[in-house]
Amino acid sequence: MLLEAGEIGFGASGRNTGFVVPSFVGGIGPGDVARRLGPDRAERLSRFVGGSAEVLYALVRRHAIDCAPEQTGWLQPAHTDETLRLVEERVRQWSTLGQPVALLDRSEAQRLTGSPIYRGGLIDRSGGQINPLAYVRGLARAAVAAGARIHPRSPAISYERSEGNWQIRSANGVVRAAKAVFATNALVGDLAPDVARTIIPVRPYQVATQPLDEATRQRILPNRQPVADLHRHTFAYRWSPDNRLVTGGLAIVATARAGPRIANGFLARLNRYLPDLPPLEPAFVWNGVIATTPSFLPEVWEIAPGLYAPIACNGRGVAIATAMGRALAGFLLREEGAALPVALGRPSPRAAHRLLSYGPSLWLGWNQLRDWRDDMWSERH
């Protein structure tokens, strides 16, 4: 049974950009995970993350989900010599794990991205893109067809242990269950304070342009592979099914009235890195909240016996959260051979969490300055 606080897809599940990326967040590769977790645990987690796109597209095919799926691969291009060396090492590491990756030279990276700023890049052919809202609604229909019960507009209000079960009180009634999962990521609110004070919420904005002409579509991402590069403030863009460029990122000052200003800033970045675009209009602008963990890795926390909170996003939630849902289901049902890709942990509330929540904005300002410096150096060399 699912107690949905709003409508299916209201949160990050429906508002993300639809990138299907079977990889860790930009600055982390399998080698970094091995140094943190040790070789055995790291290999299990890396293989899990690397296979996450295949899990998603298999679900789409199995349940005939009409979500504009395009498994064209995804691109991680490098804009400096330093990031090119990083990409080369990432290709080596992922190849060792059997991931379908390849190294792109300068000309191929520029041809596939449509941008002259890149010196090479990585392509992972298992990734791609989807319409995320259509995808999550399709998953909900498949779940109902399999016997699940979904209750929209039924936010959980409180929970307590009672006679060996969890008793969860919602706005529309009470549910009793031996096991329960907070499938909320960043939108946990006050329901699980330890979880809320452990994650760092990040508030990205997205903008979609007007539909663009055929000539532009043949020049920019001609094979329709989404891009998420290695700028510190990641430059990411893709084509929507109706031929709009979709891009976005973080904002230093994000207020209710800041949407148009932020959107124009992202369109300016498109024009800077993708020259000779036609005049761009911000046809749609939206925002949301994603959850980052202290490790920037997927985690599953056991709040109490039988009460769990998986946090699998860190900006890579479409593929990884899908795969984590399948793994968590097998674990909860004690299916033979089922195991989580991470060790069960516990949330670690931060004493100065309110101050830490300002961290992404402070980080962004500093790193935008560093990106600007790197861009200036690259243009001269």
Image: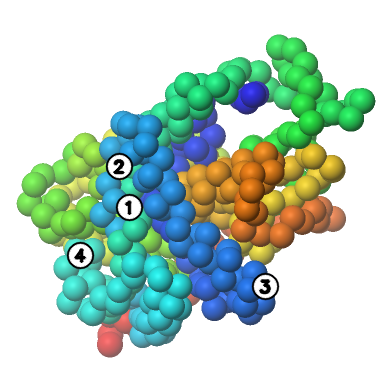
Looking at the image, tell me whether mark 3 or mark 4 is earlier in sequence order: 3
Residue at 33% over, 32% down? 64
Instruction: Say few, some or many: other residues with alpha carbon within 10 Å of mark 3 (under 14 / 14 to 19 / 20 or more).
Output: few
The image's mark for residue 112 is 4
The image's colour scheme reads: rainbow
For mark 4, give the secondary structure.
helix
Mark 2 element type = loop
Indicate whether 341 appears above or below 5: below
Mark 3 vs mark 4, foreground winner is: 3
The residue beneath circle 2 is 69
Give the CA distance from mark 3 to mark 4: 35 Å
The x and y percentages for residue 151 are: 60, 18
Identify the secondary structure beneath mark 1.
strand
Q: Residue at x 7, y 51 (%)?
A: 215
**Mark whose residue sits in front, 4 or 2:** 2
Which residue lies under the disc numbered 1? 128
352 versus 2 height, above or below: below
Q: Which badge, 2 or 3, comes first in the chain's sequence? A: 3
First reached walking from the N terminus: tag 1 or tag 3: 3
